[in-house]
Amino acid sequence: MTRALTVHRIAPGATVQDQGRAGYRAFGVSRGGAADPLALAEGAALLGQSTECAALELPGSGGVFEATAPLRIALTGAPMRAMLDGAPLVWNASHTVHSGARIEVGGASAGSYGYLHVGGGFDLPKQLGSRSAHLAAGIGRAVQAGEVLPVAEDRGSAVGLSLPQDARFDGGVLRVIESFQTAVFDARTRERFTETAFSRDARANRMGMRLNSDGEGFATSAGLNILSESILPGDIQVTGDGTPYLLLWESQTTGGYPRIATVIPADLPRAVQTPAGGVLRFRFVSRTEALEAERKRRDHLRALPKLCAPLVRDPSQIRDLLSYQLISGVTAGDVRDEKE
């Protein structure tokens, strides 16, 4: 029996993503990979498998999918309404899907990117060492309705586990460190930058997001003399009209706009998951604070499997409730004659 997921309907721009491809920046190919790496790791923990397994990344909305064989799945990232053959599925949890069952994933109630994981991961051919689609580089493509996504052999057994939802889906404060060009912005401009409430533009994508704000921009005349150089996800470039752009995983590898700051890796999942119109603020931290945040981030990723807990299901939503052994063991007590 072929293990696969048939796509009946899917949101525009949905792609298969893993951890991305390292080592190709010198050739103009950024790492790419899952927009929210934390969500990728959460799915791996819920299924008890490697974080290298590829998942389906759903931007803003999901679709309708059918299992061609029994599968284990997990749902992570931006919370979305999910159903299995019409019965609700808990988000941030793992579930069993029977052959022929249909999974329906609706729009996000918060955040931007949801993830559908399968036990074993999606078994697409690797290109440059990764199964990730990198649309900006022309590697792979968005998943289309009618496709059948093959699923690799599943060596795990964990199911019915959940992880607590965190608060990274509604914007908030992002910690930043100084970039190479932070000093070309005068002190008052840097101060205004940290005092400003930015809203994420609706035109954001996997390459980056425009940060909108009221009042004057953050331009600097010194920016006209900046030479193109290497840039990384998290860099905040300021264009000639003073508009900041936060660069993400599929951003270009070089650029000549001055960078006022760089978001630390620990806060990039919050940045990526901020929905259109969501409010973001920035706070400069020291290198020491940034390194400590990175240590805590890595510790959290390692601890994810231990944070998984059994999923407590609502009995009213269990269609096959009577097939479960709800009472086990024997009862103890005195049996008395009815005549007494």
Image (cartoon, rainbow, N blue to C red):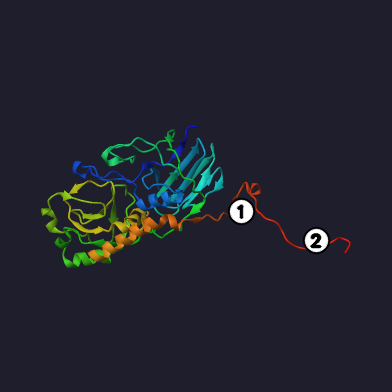
**Residue 235: x %, y % from top left:** 23, 55
Q: Is residue 228 left or right of residue 12?
A: left
Taking the spot 65% from the left edge, 46% from the top edge, the residue there is 323
Q: CA distance from mark 2 to mark 1?
A: 32 Å
Taking the spot 40% from the left edge, 44% from the top edge, the residue there is 55
Q: Is residue 285 visible?
A: no
Q: Is residue 296 visible?
A: yes
Amino acid marked by disc 2: Val
Task: Tell me the tag on residue 315.
Answer: 1
Amino acid marked by disc 1: Pro
> Could you tell me if the residues under marks 2 and 1 are in contact, i.e. CB atoms within 8 Å?
no
Among the two numbered marks 2 and 1 on one chain, the one whose residue lies closer to the N terminus: 1
Taking the spot 12% from the left edge, 51% from the top edge, the residue there is 227
Residue for badge 2: 335
**Residue 101: x %, y % from top left:** 54, 39
Specify few, some or many for label 2: CA neighbours under 10 Å numbering under 14, 14-19, or 20 or more: few
Specify few, some or many for label 1: CA neighbours under 10 Å numbering under 14, 14-19, or 20 or more: few
**Residue 268: x %, y % from top left:** 31, 55
Q: In front: 276, or 306?
A: 306
Q: Is residue 216 left or right of residue 297?
A: left
Q: Seen from this angle, which residue lies furthest left?
A: 225
**Residue 75: x %, y % from top left:** 46, 49
Q: Secondary structure at mark 2?
A: loop
Q: Is residue 13 above or below residue 308?
A: above
Q: In front: 19, or 172?
A: 19
Quadrant where the C terminus lies? Answer: bottom right
